[in-house]
Amino acid sequence: MVKGISRRVVVVESPDQRFFEQAIFIVRNDAAGEGVTARDLVEEAKRIARGYTGGEKSGLDRAWREWSPLVFALMGAAVIGLAWLIVTLM
């Protein structure tokens, strides 16, 4: 359905473009009447988009997410090795 109404939108580029290229926010008609500037609209749209995409996380969090399978595999191997050592020595 096509309406003949002009709408204002804010387009935010995704920081992680694996799944999404951009987010499009449709601005409410009464938002401009409340003293909200264009910069405020863009900053709020960026904040919301970051919240959904997980952007702007710390380097430690990103490293843990990337290395966690390796860490868990090594921990599992250590537990199996320890169990083998205990069984062998008894």
Image: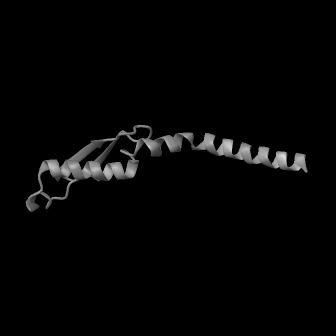
Q: Is residue 14 left or right of residue 72?
A: left
In the image, farthest residue toward the front: 89
Q: What residue lies at 19% left-to-right and 51% top-to-bottom?
A: 41
Q: What residue lies at 62% left-to-right and 40% top-to-bottom?
A: 70
- In depth, the one of 90 and 18 nearer the eye is 90
Q: Position of residue 14 (x, y in %)?
A: 34, 41
Q: Is residue 45 left or right of residue 62?
A: left
Colour mapping used in the image: one colour
Count of numbered tags: 0
- In depth, the one of 65 and 45 nearer the eye is 65
Q: Where 36 sits versus 70, above or below? A: below
Q: Quadrant of residue 21 in the image? A: top left
Q: Where 71 sits versus 90, above or below? A: above
Q: What residue lies at 15% left-to-right and 59% top-to-bottom?
A: 31
Q: Is residue 52 left or right of residue 66?
A: left
Q: Position of residue 34 (x, y in %)?
A: 10, 62
Q: What residue lies at 20% left-to-right and 48% top-to-bottom?
A: 42
Q: Is residue 30 left or right of residue 10?
A: left
Q: Where 18 sits versus 51, above or below? A: above
Q: Position of residue 12 (x, y in %)?
A: 28, 43
Q: Position of residue 13 (x, y in %)?
A: 30, 40
Residue 6 appears in the picture as rendered: no
Residue 53 appears in the picture as rendered: yes
